Every structure is written in structure tokens, then in C-alpha cells.
């Protein structure tokens, strides 16, 4: 039987290795973006902030591979540095929403009754709100830029995630292993975190990746509207806004960050979908 | 049972060398190897096997209804027609018209949005003689009459408005609507209640004989096969091990596996000291490709069994066995069989009933459904269990037996009534002090039905049992040794402690679940159908385990089951629960031999005749 156990394990590894080519490509994209975010200053050919008004708005050349923007900043370097805000915000949003939603979902699904009703009505209310609009209004009124936007998006993302966790918990709750733990007198907290949580985690983790993709797009959208990062920060959404006027003189200044937003979001989505299918089968 | 096939007539169905496998290349999994079957006109045969034997897929291969990614090879000749070669549109015309199928779950077999009569009418509509509505509805009535439905407006109802038995009758009428020559019935009664099971099988038999139709019955239940069919094919891990006429196989099985299956079925008419269980569990066909499939579990195995896969060989006209050692062991097999049947005198009921361990009085439980409907699951139930006493609670689904068990261990709170355990009132667990609650938890434990979800899939055996030890306030120091000794108590090797449930068989999981509940040192176990989800050959092992624990630890049981044969083996006293009320109570002996309540009588009559006890 031990041999059989090992065989099962080997099979599992083979399955991961046998991820479809598209998913492997998506993983590659994410790794590249992550390297850019962490080692950006080492990789970028130039500082993202150095202005050279004399050589502003240049198409791609040997010196500036993706050309320069109106202020003469190197578009390629700004794009590489932009990976930082493209990753950090969405990671914080996904992690934050995931943590809160897991706690709320566990409590709501397992305890049921009044607690469940209150949490779920709140979820209904939050889901009814148009998320991007709320973010625009709050960030516009309160100010605070990027991190305010992150906070607002955490709260908005928590609601649908809570519903997903709750559903997964409801699926586990009637199973005999939970009953067995109750009969043994295991405490509720322990049942929730030791028994239920590990069994719903795979589904939730897959959703976290999808959260990331949505968060990236929402944050980029806010930055485009001037509500996200500070002016001057290398950020993909912000670059779209700043460089919209030079679309025809240096298209790369607009297309490169736009392509990165799309590539990163689609890649995360692909990985999330693939994980979801693998983990929930 | 009537017709032995006439020698002159060619069989209706001849299956030769049928192999079924799933997947391709390195992923390929063998399901069955080289199966030969014959079905004569008007004959009923049974394919008997446990889960994983390949019996259902063999049947599906004959109707060419295999799921995607499952492939069959070999020859299937039906009335001179090679079914493996004809194109799909042709096969479609054969299905339903000449070969029909009846499946296990009548509710999933019927379209939930179609009135039940329409399922039958649909089959009639393409025949010219039933083109007029009046002719069709007259025919519909006649067809429903054939399956024992008369007068009522069953045809007008939707499937979910019918009971399981009624639904299966309609499904049978629909399967028969085009007057097929061959009916394949895949576990047609397994999903039904015991008393309904017996009715459906009787009906099926009557219809088969009445029409002179051929029948292939797929079942895991030897007793059912014996009482319904003319011949039996015993399938195990993808290989046929024995073939023969019902009478012959029942009286004198010629393969150790068949004998093991017969003996491991608890007899309903007597109590035996110990069931003869087959050890281990069913292997995967690929693991036994080059030897006798039963090798690992056989008491008579020898080197010769592992030389090659033994083929079926004829030992008498119409009788074959795949056992290569049959000549040497036949005498021993017969002796074992006689030994297994010696009844033991039943223990006289304990006179010292002074202080019951469990005392339930006037317990009621009413569930309120969403629409405000009330369901009265228990209506004033009273039971007593003395320390060390083994008590059965018998009833069908919906009788409230599971609810009673769950109330006793505190998983449900009763609506009214009292439950006392060792003198402590525990009807509402939430009102107990922490101390007495944990004391009750250490007195009462529960074993659940479904072995596949009774253990947390992400916890190792050590962790599951260890948690129970901790819950009982055990010190961490010797927990490891305790887990090992508990595993030994339930007959598992110590090195199982590192395993996850996914690498355990159903029987092994149930053993771990028992070890987990023993960890707190309980005085009583509430067992809710603990063996009904297990393979037949494994059921006996677990029943023996329960018997042994009863003797060794003086455990009291509340054994919740629908199976009276099980009751006979492990239980001293029985309560019969019917629609939330106790309708009969007494010692096992009394209730089984002189049932007073008509419902109890019906339950006892529905047991297929015991295979072991007859024809000895």
C-alpha cells in the first residue's frame, strides 16, 4: 500500500508538471513581472525619473528601446519600475480580502442562524454596490491615493469572497467527520480552524488569484483617472493617462504599459482558473 | 427459475472474451478481463460482484452505453447480431426495443419534469397500433397494471411525488414498454427500503417469467441472486471466478471466494459465534493481472495460484470454477462451511437491569421545514440500555432511527422528553456544565455510516485518533503509544498511523473511526448503519470487530440498522422503530422468531432467503 501511496504522489506531481502550455506561459509572465517588481532598479536601463526635455516624446531608438515620454523619461524603465505598484497593491488586496472573507465565511457558514443572516445581508448589500464607482467616489472625496484605494478595494472584494467561503463551509458542515469531532467534544474554534478550514482552503486559494487580477485592473483604472498613485510615480495605469496625448508620436509609451496590464491580469486569471479546476475536482 | 435452456436453441446473448478498460497508454486501467457470458431465451442470470468487480460496466458494455474514456473489446452476439460491430444508429434501435435497462436509482432515471405516465407513453407512441390517444391510454393502464399499479392516478404525477418503490415500478414499466427480449437490471432494488426491495424483486421475477423475457441481474447480494435467477456469474476484480446454476452454487460453492461471500453474509435465522470474514479488501484488476485475483485474501493459496491467471474451467456440465486448487481443497471448504453454521446458544437476557446506562423517555423531535411544515421524526420514544448490553434499533429510512441516535449523542436537541446517561439528564447538551458534558462525551461515542467522509481527508490517522485522545484529556507523552495500541485493538497495523484516509479502503477507514471513538474510553457506542456502505466481504470483518470489542471491553451498543441479519449477529435486544414510534421490543430471539407487530413481520419476510442455511 505504501508503494501505492507513493505512486499516487508521483501521479500528482506529474499532473502539476502536465499543466497546459498556456498556463505555463502565464506562470512565466507572472515570474517575469515579479522579478521586475523586486529587482527593477537593477534591470532597468535608466532611472524612471530622469527628465530630458530635449529628447521628449521620441519613438523607440537604440538608446531608448521603447522611446521616451513628453518629459523625456525612458518608457521601458518606467514600465519595468511600474511592476511594483502593479503587484503590491493587488497582492495586499487579495490577501486582505481573503483573510477577512475566510473568517467571516467560516463563522457565517458554520454557526448559521442570526450571525449568518447578518453577515449575508451585509454581503448582499456590498455586492449590490458598483465597486469601481464606490472606489472612485471614496478615493476622490477622502483622498490619500493608492493606499486608500487599496483599502476600499479590500472591503469591496471581501463581500463576494465571503459568499464563496460560506458555500464551501456549508458543503463540509453536514459531513460525518465534523459530527464526529462534535461528539468527541472538540471546541468550535478548533473544528473551524483545524477541520473545516483546511478542507475549504483549496477553493478559496484559487479565488484569491482571480481577486488579484480584478484588483490590478481596478487599481490601474483609478490611477488612470488620477486617483491612484502620486503623479510622477512609475505606474502602468498612470502611464496610460500621462502618455495618452503622444499616442501617435510614440505609441510604445501607451501600448507597452497597456499590454503589461492585460498580460498580467490574463495570466493570473488563467492560473486561477487552472488551479480552481485542479483543486476542486 | 423455470427454464433450463434448451440444448438445441442458440442462446439469445453470447458474450465472448469481453474486456473493459479505461483510458489509454500508461493511464490505462483494466476493469474486466476476458469475460464469457451466455443468456438463453427466457433465462435469468445474475452477475454478482462487489464494488470494483466491473459488473456494472460489463452490463453497460453489452448495451453499448459505456461512459466516455471506457472501452470494450471482444464479441457480443445478440440473436445472431454482432453488437460490437453495428453502427450506433442501428444500436439505438436495438436499445429499448430489444435490450432494455433498469437502473439503481429510479429518481435519476426519470425526467423530473415529465409526468410519470409520459415516460411509458413516449415508448409506445411510435407504434402504429397505439396512434390514437384512447388506445395509448388504455395500453398505459394495462402496462401500469402489469407492474402492480392500479386505480391510482400515478400516471398523472411527477416522479418526485412518488415513493421510491412506486417510482421504480414506473421505471420498470417504461423499460418494458417496447417489449424487450433482454432486460438488464443494475441493482434495481439497492436504493430502496428493505420491504420495498422484496416487493420489487418479486415483481421483476414475476414479469420476467410471465413474459418469457431474458434477464441479467447485476447485484452485490448473493442471496438476492439466488432467489431471483437461474444461473450465477461470480465476478471479482474483473475476473469471473465461478459460474453455475443457482442451486448448485448455493449448495456447494466451488471457489473459495464464493464460499467466503456466502459465509460472510450474516445469516438471519441463527446467531453464529463468529462470521467467517474474508480478510483484506478487493484489489485493483491491474494488481492481480498475472495471478488468481483472489490470491491475497484466500486461506488456501499456494504458489500455483501465482503462476498465471487461472482461467475458468468446466468442472461439471454448466458449472465452472477458476480455482486451480479445487481438487485439493474441496473437502476443507465443505468442512469450513459446516463449522461456520453451528449456532451458539443465545445469552439469556441480563436480569440485572437495575441501573440502565442509557434511559430515554417520551422523546419527541419535530423538525420545522422552511415552509412552516412540521415533520414529526420521533413521537414519544422510550428505550433503555443496560451497561454492556447490545441493543438494536431497526427501522427503514424515515423511521427516525438516525434522529434518535443523533439526539442521544447530542448532535440534535430533542423537542421534548428526557435522555439520561448514567443518571445525568442530557437532553439538552447546551445546558450541561462543561465538566459533565465532557464526562458524557467520554461515556458515549458514535460511529457513522459513510466511511468515506467519517475521517477528515486532510488529517493522518495519527492526527484523527490523537485528537480524540486529547479531547479525553490524555497527556501528550504517551499519546503515540496509545494511538498504536488503539490501532491494534481494531485490527490495523501500527504503521497505518501515518496514513491519510485517501490511502485506506472503506473497511480500514471504518476501523480507524472505531479506534477514534474508543480513544476516549467510552462505555457505549451509538453505531449508525456502520457497515451498510461497505463491501459485502468487508462487512463481516467489521461485524466481527464489533462483536470482539463487545466481549473484550464490555461495550454497550445502540446498533442502528435496517438489516435484521446484522441484528441477529450482534444484538441482544431489539427495538423496532416505525414512523417515529417504537412498535415492538424484545430479545432478538423473540422478535425474530415470533414477531407480533405486522410491520416487524413484513421486515422479516423481506429478507431474501438465507443462502447458507439451505440445502445443507
Image (tube, coloured by chain):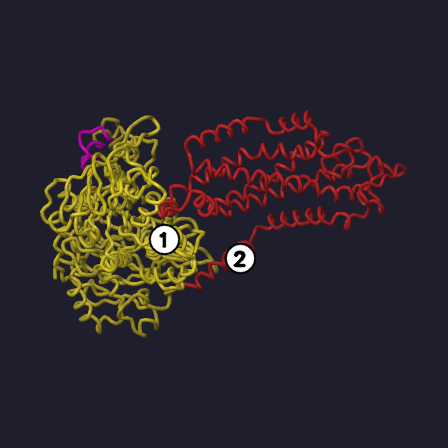
Chain colours: A red, B yellow
Give the letter of the chain under mark 1: B
Mark 1 and mark 2 in contact (Cβ < 8 Å)? no
Q: Residues within 10 Å of mark 2 (few under 14, many from 20)?
A: few
Where does label 2 land, which residue? A14
Residue B177 is at least partly visible in this image = no
Residue B304 image label: none
Residue B136: quarter of image: top left
Q: Nearer the viewer, residue B209 or B154?
A: B154
Residue located 73% across and 50% down the image: A39
Q: Secondary structure at mark 1?
A: loop
Q: CA distance from mark 2 to mark 1?
A: 35 Å
- Residue B221 lies left or right of residue A55; in this view the side is left
How far from the left and from the top, in percent, is residue A49?
A: 82, 40
- Residue B548 lies left or right of residue B516; in this view the side is left
Where does label 1 land, which residue? B84
Q: Nearer the viewer, residue B615 or B176?
A: B615
Residue A255 is at least partly visible in this image = yes
Residue located 44% across and 37% down the image: A109
How far from the left and from the top, in percent, is residue B585?
A: 15, 44
Give the letter of the chain under mark 2: A
Which mark's residue is nearer the viewer, 2 or 1? 2
- The vertical placement of B126 against B81, above or below, is above
How far from the left and from the top, in percent, is residue B76?
A: 32, 55
Residue B33 magenta-drawn? no
How far from the left and from the top, in percent, is residue B30?
A: 39, 59
- The vertical placement of B460 against B330, above or below, is above
Query: Which stretch is magenta?
Result: B139-154
Amino acid at each position: 500500500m505504501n508503494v501505492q501511496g507513493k505512486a499516487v504522489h508521483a501521479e500528482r506531481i506529474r499532473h502539476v508538471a502536465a499543466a497546459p502550455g498556456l498556463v505555463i506561459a502565464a506562470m512565466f509572465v507572472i515570474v517575469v513581472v515579479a522579478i521586475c517588481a523586486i529587482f527593477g532598479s537593477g534591470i532597468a536601463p535608466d532611472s524612471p525619473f530622469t527628465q530630458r526635455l530635449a529628447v521628449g516624446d521620441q519613438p523607440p531608438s537604440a538608446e531608448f528601446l521603447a522611446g521616451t515620454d513628453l518629459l523625456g523619461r525612458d518608457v521601458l524603465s518606467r514600465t519595468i519600475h511600474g511592476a511594483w505598484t502593479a503587484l503590491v497593491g493587488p497582492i495586499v488586496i487579495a490577501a486582505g480580502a481573503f483573510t477577512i472573507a475566510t473568517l467571516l465565511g467560516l463563522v457565517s457558514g458554520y454557526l448559521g442562524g442570526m450571525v449568518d443572516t447578518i453577515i449575508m445581508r451585509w454581503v448582499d448589500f456590498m455586492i449590490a454596490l458598483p465597486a469601481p464607482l464606490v472606489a472612485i467616489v471614496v478615493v476622490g472625496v477622502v483622498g490619500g491615493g493608492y493606499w486608500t484605494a487599496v483599502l476600499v478595494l479590500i472591503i469591496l472584494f471581501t463581500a463576494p469572497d465571503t459568499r464563496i467561503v460560506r458555500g464551501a463551509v456549508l458543503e463540509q458542515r453536514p459531513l460525518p467527520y465534523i459530527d464526529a469531532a462534535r461528539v468527541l467534544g472538540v471546541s468550535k474554534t478548533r473544528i473551524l480552524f483545524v477541520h473545516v478550514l483546511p478542507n475549504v482552503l483549496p477553493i478559496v486559494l484559487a479565488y484569491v488569484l482571480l481577486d488579484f487580477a480584478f484588483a490590478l485592473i481596478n487599481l490601474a483604472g483609478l490611477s488612470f483617472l488620477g486617483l491612484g498613485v502620486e503623479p510622477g510615480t512609475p505606474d502602468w495605469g498612470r502611464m496610460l493617462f500621462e502618455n495618452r496625448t503622444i499616442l501617435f508620436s510614440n505609441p510604445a509609451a501607451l501600448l507597452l504599459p497597456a499590454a503589461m496590464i492585460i498580460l498580467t491580469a490574463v495570466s493570473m486569471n488563467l492560473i486561477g482558473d487552472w488551479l480552481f479546476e485542479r483543486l476542486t475536482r | 427459475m423455470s427454464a433450463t435452456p434448451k440444448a438445441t436453441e442458440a442462446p439469445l446473448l453470447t458474450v465472448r472474451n469481453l474486456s473493459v478498460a479505461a483510458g489509454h497508454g500508461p493511464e490505462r486501467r483494466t476493469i474486466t478481463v476476458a469475460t464469457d457470458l451466455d443468456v438463453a431465451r427466457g433465462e435469468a442470470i445474475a452477475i454478482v460482484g462487489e464494488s470494483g468487480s466491473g459488473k456494472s460496466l460489463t452490463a453497460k458494455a453489452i448495451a453499448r452505453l459505456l461512459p466516455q474514456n471506457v472501452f470494450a473489446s471482444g464479441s457480443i452476439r445478440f440473436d445472431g447480431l454482432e453488437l460490437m460491430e453495428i453502427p450506433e444508429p442501428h444500436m439505438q434501435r436495438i436499445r429499448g426495443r430489444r435490450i432494455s435497462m433498469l437502473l439503481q436509482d429510479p429518481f435519476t432515471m426519470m425526467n423530473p419534469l415529465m409526468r410519470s405516465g409520459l415516460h411509458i407513453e413516449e415508448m409506445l407512441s411510435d407504434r402504429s397500433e397505439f396512434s390514437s390517444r384512447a388506445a395509448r391510454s388504455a395500453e398505459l393502464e394495462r402496462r401500469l397494471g402489469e407492474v402492480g399499479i392500479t386505480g391510482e392516478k400515478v400516471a398523472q404525477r411527477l416522479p418526485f411525488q412518488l415513493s421510491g418503490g412506486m417510482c421504480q415500478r414506473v421505471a420498470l414499466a417504461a423499460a418494458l414498454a417496447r417489449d424487450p427480449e433482454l432486460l438488464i437490471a443494475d441493482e434495481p432494488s439497492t436504493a430502496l427500503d428493505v420491504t420495498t426491495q422484496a416487493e420489487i424483486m418479486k415483481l421483476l421475477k414475476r414479469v420476467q417469467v410471465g413474459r418469457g423475457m431474458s434477464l441479467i441481474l447485476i447485484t452485490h447480494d448473493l442471496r438476492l441472486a439466488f432467489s431471483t435467477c437461474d444461473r450465477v456469474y461470480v465476478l471479482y476484480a474483473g475476473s469471473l471466478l465461478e459460474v453455475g446454476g443457482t442451486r448448485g452454487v448455493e449448495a456447494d460453492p466451488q471457489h473459495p471466494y464464493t464460499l467466503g461471500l456466502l459465509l460472510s453474509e450474516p445469516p438471519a435465522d441463527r446467531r453464529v459465534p463468529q462470521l467467517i470474514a474474508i480478510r483484506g479488501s478487493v484489489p485493483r484488476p491491474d494488481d492481480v493481472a498475472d495471478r488468481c485475483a483472489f490470491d491475497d485474501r484466500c486461506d488456501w493459496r499456494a504458489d500455483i495460484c501465482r503462476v498465471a491467471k487461472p482461467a475458468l474451467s468446466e468442472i461439471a456440465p454448466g458449472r465452472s470454477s477458476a480455482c486451480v486448487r479445487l481438487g485439493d481443497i474441496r473437502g476443507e471448504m465443505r468442512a469450513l462451511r459446516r463449522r461456520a453454521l453451528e449456532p451458539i446458544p443465545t445469552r439469556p437476557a441480563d436480569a440485572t437491569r437495575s441501573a440502565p446506562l442509557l434511559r430515554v423517555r417520551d422523546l419527541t423531535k419535530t423538525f420545522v421545514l422552511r415552509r412552516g411544515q412540521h415533520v414529526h421524526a420521533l413521537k414519544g420514544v422510550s428505550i433503555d440500555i443496560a451497561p454492556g448490553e447490545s441493543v438494536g434499533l431497526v427501522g427503514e429510512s424515515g423511521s427516525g432511527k438516525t434522529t434518535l441516535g443523533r439526539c442521544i449523542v447530542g448532535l440534535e436537541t430533542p423537542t421534548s422528553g428526557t435522555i439520561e446517561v448514567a443518571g445525568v439528564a442530557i437532553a439538552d447538551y447546551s445546558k450541561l456544565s462543561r465538566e459533565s458534558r465532557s464526562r458524557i462525551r467520554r461515556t458515549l461515542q458514535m460511529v457513522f455510516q459513510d466511511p468515506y467522509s467519517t475521517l477528515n481527508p486532510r488529517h493522518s490517522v495519527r492526527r484523527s485518533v490523537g485528537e480524540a485522545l486529547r479531547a479525553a484529556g490524555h497527556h501528550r507523552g504517551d499519546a503515540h503509544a496509545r494511538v498504536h495500541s488503539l490501532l491494534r485493538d481494531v485490527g490495523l497495523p501500527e504503521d497505518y498511523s501515518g496514513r491519510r484516509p485517501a490511502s485506506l479502503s472503506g473497511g480500514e477507514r471504518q476501523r480507524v473511526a472505531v479506534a477514534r471513538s474508543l480513544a476516549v474510553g467510552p462505555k457505549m457506542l451509538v453505531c449508525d448503519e456502520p457497515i451498510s456502505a461497505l463491501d459485502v466481504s468487508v462487512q463481516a470483518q467489521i461485524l466481527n470487530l464489533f462483536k470482539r470489542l463487545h466481549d473484550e471491553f464490555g461495550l454497550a451498543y445502540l446498533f442502528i440498522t435496517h438489516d435484521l441479519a446484522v441484528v441477529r449477529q450482534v444484538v441482544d435486544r431489539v427495538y423496532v422503530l416505525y414512523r417515529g414510534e417504537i412498535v415492538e421490543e424484545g430479545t432478538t430471539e423473540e422478535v425474530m422468531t415470533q414477531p407480533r407487530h405486522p410491520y416487524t413481520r413484513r421486515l422479516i419476510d423481506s429478507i431474501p432467503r438465507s443462502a447458507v442455511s439451505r440445502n445443507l
